[in-house]
Image: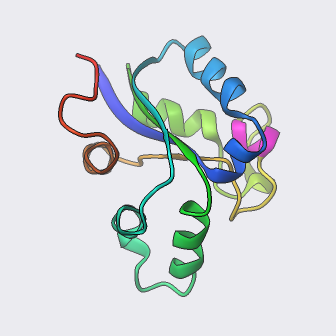
Amino acid sequence: MERTFAMIKPDGVRRGLTPEILARIHRKGYRVVGLKQMVIPREVAQAHYGEHKERPFFGELVDFITGGPVVAIALEGENAITGWRAMMGATNPANAAPGTIRADFATTTGENVTHGSDSPESAERELGLFFKEGELLK
């Protein structure tokens, strides 16, 4: 079993896509072991997107992700990291495969509805940023 971090971003929450995205997660067979709706504190957002700190879009990215509520999700399942990323589709919705979340719902690369960890290391780090000890189901 593998765990990963998934997020429904502010644009997805604002557009009421949370129930559909959670339904897709459940239909895929992943177990939700942590779930919370929150507004991300700026410091957490900066740490979350820390690898982009030197890029010109970093400030906009932090502003966007802290600009409204998100749904933070801890998923568990076989190959959850690559499986969730496949369900999301390409970052640019124009390049996302039909039937993926981003192909179906994203409007732009900047507002692409979801996030998912890209490796076991980032999954561990991101789960630790968004969930405290004891908040995840065993």
Vertical relation: 112 (above or below) 79: below
Of residues 2 and 7, the one drawn nearer to the viewer in this rendering: 7
Left or right: where 72 falls relative to 48: right
Asked if the stretch drawn in magenta spans residue 25, the answer is: no
Tell me the chief SS of the magenta region. Answer: helix
> What is the span of residues highlighted in magenta in the rendered image?
101-105
The percent coordinates of residue 102 (x first, y second) are 72, 44
- Assign the N terminus to one quadrant of the image: top left
Residue at 53 percent across and 80 percent down: it is 59
The percent coordinates of residue 54 (x first, y second) are 42, 86
- Assign the C terminus to one quadrant of the image: top left
Query: How many callouts does the rendering have?
Result: 0
Of residues 68 and 94, the one drawn nearer to the viewer in this rendering: 68
Left or right: where 137 falls relative to 5: left
Quarter of the image where one finds residue 92: bottom right
Left or right: where 127 falls relative to 30: left
Vertical relation: 111 (above or below) 81: below
Asked if the stretch drawn in magenta spans residue 104, the answer is: yes
